Amino acid sequence: MEERKKQVLNAIIKDYIANAEPVGSRAVAKKYDLGVSPATIRNEMSDLEEEGYIEQPHTSAGRIPSAKGYRYFVDHLMQRERLTTAQLKAVRQAMRGRVDEMEDFMRSCCNMISQLTHYTALVAMPEQGRGTLENIQLVPVSDHQLLVVLLTSTGLIRHKLVDLPQEISWDELAGIESRMRRQLCGREIKTITYELLHDLLADYQLQEKISAQALELIEQTLSQEAGHKIFTGGVTNMLSQPEFHDIDKLKSMFSLIEEDDKLEKLLGAAAGGQLTVAIGGEIPVEGIEDCSMVVANYFVNGEKAGSIGVLGPTRLNYGRTVSMMEVIASELSKAISAKDDKNK
């Protein structure tokens, strides 16, 4: 694309993101000082429209960006905005939560993302079927109660209080724990099956001593096919966006948020990399063509653990949102990895 066309497209998109109103040639000439007349800008806008980068919603109205225009902007023109000191403080404050209470921690992160971006936030718990089993702890609580704690390399921590049918000495528990660690720790989660665990516990003659609750906990935690919980926040932020004053569009949005399988598809947009921007029809879910998503993966010790995302109108502030999601995903990776290292 010629340099002047880039400047005009950049000006139109910036102005439309800020004001949600069609942009005319005079506004571009007045606000952005491109060094050319409104007539020249009109000619460039005409060419951009013909090439599909902008659209004219009504006769004699100004232009608005198309999905193709936004895509070109994100790929070639977008400038990331640095987070303010207050924004960085809010991110790091959220990361000080108790990572061992994973659900509360991730819910807090979700709320923080929606508050900072002013869009709808989606946050997935660490995926259960990925990574390796890093640690097993059997913690005696009393003569007849045992706390089973499991830790995976993706930072997922599960714990359950188990009632014992008969007393087990601390020395015996330590021996059982040691043997289970030798047999299971370091294995890929996907290779640990219910049958393997059942046979292992039978070999240790634990079936009489540890109730079936322990098996259920391990199966739930290590099941490769188990889904991962997704939190949403800031859904009502969409109410403030002019694009969603249409009640039918709002209904589609609220319906989407209630369907976990569709939320998983949305967060799957960044499956191949650290961060992905999906615009309009690029989003892998029908009914939200007027939206865009920014999805970032977070990692535990270099291994993908889950995803976070924001959903907003195609008019969302890409430069600011991309920067925020990169920083938040990085800080989240550090927080969970640090907790994971402490538990090894």
Image: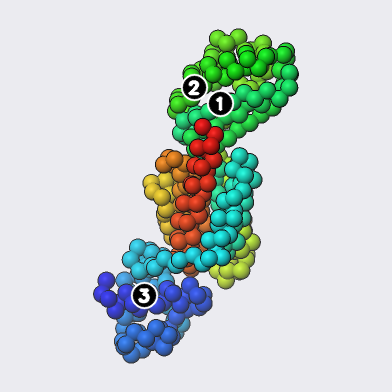
Task: Work out how far the residue at label 2 is from the one at label 1, CA to CA, in angstroms.
Answer: 9 Å
Answer above or below: position of 134 versus 237.
above
Q: Residue furthest front?
A: 171
> Which of these two is toward me, 98 or 273?
98
Crowding at mark 3 (Cα within 10 Å: few <14, some 14-19, many 20+): many
Amino acid at pointer 1: Ile
Q: Position of residue 289 (x, y in %)?
A: 48, 60
Residue at the disc numbered 2: 184
Q: Position of residue 124 (x, y in %)?
A: 54, 45
Instruction: Please tell me the numbered disc located at residue 136.
Output: 1
Disc 3, SS: helix
Q: Quadrant of the N terminus?
A: bottom left
Quarter of image, res 214: top right
Instruction: Please tell me the numbered disc located at residue 9.
Output: 3
Left or right, 211 with respect to 293, comes to: right
Mark before the other along the chain sequence, 2 or 3: 3
Can residue 119 be seen in the rendering of this structure? no
